[in-house]
């Protein structure tokens, strides 16, 4: 068994770094926004037009997007050198573009929601990662982890979609905690990034 070269590890670390920056930054901007509630309010409200954290929020998401691009490069190189498809890297890259767009185009700019919806493509990254390595005996743990995280991402998306039925009973129960529900979606995907990075660092080439 031949280990994947360590030169890719520095790039893969940008996955966990992106996750740490995002949640630390969101918490910090929340502190500088009077009356803001992480439990009830959406993340986008931190960077909406006219808010105290507008510029900081935009810079934060731009940096997170840059980290995801670097991480995607590390994913692509690692998978290529291990003999697998680099397709998961493109879905991570798609999430980077979406994150940058959400930060640059502040709510209520029409493009804010366009980029927000485009995140659905990036959310497929765990599934693609699992499918790419599904037959690899040396990547079973990576495949299982990605499948579990994808299931959690899908459950979180379903919970977030309750906003489409604002007169429904389910939304009535979720509304007071919608900030938490939205953050659970981000947490699931970015936790996958961190775990995927760690597992890729341990991946070994067949033969």
Image: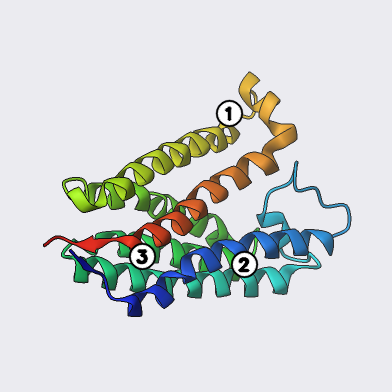
143 and 86: which is toward the camera: 143
Let me know if residue 168 appears in the view: no
Give the farthest residue toward the front.
1
Name the secondary structure under disc 2: helix
- Residue 201, numbered circle: 3
186 and 81: which is toward the camera: 81
For residue 44, side relative to residue 87 (left or right): right
Q: Are marks 3 and 2 in contact (CB under 8 Å)?
A: no
Name the secondary structure under disc 3: helix
Q: Position of residue 97 (x, y in %)?
A: 45, 67
Let me know if residue 32 appears in the view: yes
- N-term mark: 3 or 1: 1
Query: Quadrant location of the N terminus?
Result: bottom left
Foreground mark, 1 or 2, reads 2
Q: Label 1 vs label 2: CA separation?
A: 32 Å
Q: Which residue is labeled 1 in the image?
A: 165
Q: Position of residue 170 (x, y in %)?
A: 62, 23
Is the residue 130 above or below the residue 106 in the image?
above
- N-term mark: 3 or 2: 2
Q: Residue at x 66, y 56 (%)?
A: 44
For residue 84, side relative to residue 9 (left or right): left
Q: Which residue is labeled 2 in the image?
A: 21
Disc 1: CA contacts within 10 A as few (<14), some (14-19) or many (>=20) = few
The quarter of the picture where residue 49 lies is bottom right
Q: Residue at x 32, y 46 (%)?
A: 141
Foreground mark, 3 or 2, reads 3
């Amino acid at each position: 068994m031949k280990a994947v070269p360590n030169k890719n590890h520095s790039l893969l670390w940008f996955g966990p770094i992106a996750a740490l920056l995002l949640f630390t930054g969101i918490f910090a901007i929340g502190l500088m926004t009077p009356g803001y509630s992480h439990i009830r309010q959406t993340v986008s409200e931190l960077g909406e037009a006219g808010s105290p954290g507008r510029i900081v929020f935009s810079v934060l998401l731009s940096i997170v997007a840059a980290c995801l691009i670097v991480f995607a490069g590390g994913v692509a190189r690692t998978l290529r050198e291990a003999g697998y498809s680099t397709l998961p890297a493109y879905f991570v890259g798609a999430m980077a573009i979406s994150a940058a767009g959400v930060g640059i185009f502040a709510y209520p700019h029409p493009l804010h929601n366009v980029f927000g919806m485009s995140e659905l493509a990036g959310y497929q990254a765990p599934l693609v990662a699992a499918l790419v390595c599904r037959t690899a005996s040396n990547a079973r743990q990576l495949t299982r982890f990605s499948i579990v995280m994808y299931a959690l991402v899908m459950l979180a998306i379903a919970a977030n979609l309750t906003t489409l039925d604002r007169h429904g009973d389910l939304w009535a129960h979720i509304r007071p905690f919608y900030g938490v529900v939205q953050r659970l979606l981000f947490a699931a995907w970015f936790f996958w990034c961190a775990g995927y990075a760690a597992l890729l660092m341990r991946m070994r080439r067949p033969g």
